[in-house]
Image: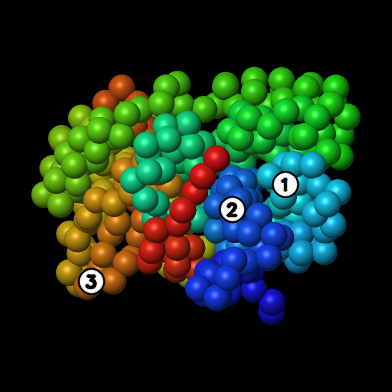
Amino acid sequence: MVGTPQTAADAGRGAGSPDPATEAFLTHRNLLFTVAYELLGSAADAEDVLQETWLRWAGVDLGAVRDQRAYLVRIATRQALTRLRAVGRRRESYVGPWLPEPLLTAPDVADDIALADSVSMAMLLVLETLGPTERAVFVLREVFDLGYDEIAEAVDKSPAAVRQIAHRARAHVAARRPRRVVPAAETRTVLDAFRRAVETGDLQRLLDLLAPDVVLLGDGGGVKQAVLRPIVGADKVARLLAGGWGKVPGVTSLQPTQVNGNPALVVRLDGELDTVLAVHVDDGRIGGLYAVRNPEKLSHMAKETPLSR
């Protein structure tokens, strides 16, 4: 398979600058990955979209391109939409709840509050409730601030239709998204208390930290054991966590980390990464717990993934 030019161009910089097409692609690579990831919720699929985008971009006459960023985003969006419609059918047969693929992210992602919110596990799950075109329009407009004309070219709709789709998508997301963006420091404080409560089996403290209607989702992909249905309610979730932690065979640890631009926890079993635990915090309590155990979804936790808008 022909790779994207990232490594080859970086390696060749000592011998001279890359060609204009490669240079433009590298300039916008992190943006293109972020667009594809927000549309797909899968880093592996986003990487494939980058590959397909590069193959098409390499054959473009750059002299005819007025705005390289917009042109590249348009290619990536179209490739992501094609893939999104295909993977949607695969997810219908997925074993248990499907959760987005977690990314280990650098501190600068958290510094961009809007970006961190848009790639949070909670927001990606809200985006999953949109149709493919609605999702693309919402992401390109609300996250990346593209104009309606640019979005229209990317999704093959008229600007007027895009405006209507954007309005519907905004209303849909507003009705389902978290009420406010929680500062990272607040999430970190709650997570630290949560970690201590789980490790000590402190049921009452867990009940205090969990929202009454908290939802726990687990994604084992049929490979690792995980809850096959959402666990709803503070009492059920707290008892599951308090009772289950001490029964896990081997040496377990909960460690803080940064996932999708937000504070999170990783569970290590005998020193090996076992689970990524992302959370949504609101009013000082945890309203959503998202436990990803599927090994195929943990490969991007080995090194930081750069994201940008």
Furthest residue to the bottom? Answer: 1
On the image, the x and y values in percent for residue 271 come to 23, 71
| Residue 33 in view here | no
Instruction: Select label 2 or label 3 by which is in front.
Output: 2
Q: Amino acid at mark 3?
A: Gly
On the image, the x and y values in percent for residue 300 come to 45, 63
Q: Residue at x 25, y 44 (%)?
A: 239
Q: Amino acid at mark 1?
A: Gln
Q: Work out whether mark 2 precedes mark 3 in sequence or the reverse, and give the earlier one.
A: 2
The residues bearing labels 2 and 1 have C-alpha atoms spaced at a distance of 10 Å
State the residue position of label 2: 27
Q: How is the image coloured?
A: rainbow
**Which type of secondary structure does the marked residue at label 1 adopt?**
helix
Q: Work out whether mark 2 precedes mark 1 in sequence or the reverse, and give the earlier one.
A: 2
Q: Amino acid at mark 2?
A: Thr
State the residue position of label 3: 271
State the residue position of label 1: 68
**Which type of secondary structure does the marked residue at label 3 adopt?**
loop
Q: Quadrant of the C terminus?
A: top right
109 vs 59, nearest the viewer: 59
Instruction: Select label 3 or label 1 by which is in front.
Output: 1
Q: Quadrant of residue 54?
A: bottom right
Q: Which mark is residue 143?
A: none
Q: Residue at x 74, y 41 (%)?
A: 67
Mark 3: give few (<14), some (14-19) or many (20+) Cα within 10 Å.
few
Q: Residue at x 55, y 75 (%)?
A: 15
Q: Is residue 174 left or right of residue 164?
A: left
Q: Are marks 2 and 1 in contact (CB under 8 Å)?
A: yes
Q: Residue at x 76, y 46 (%)?
A: 71
On the image, the x and y values in percent for residue 92 come to 67, 54
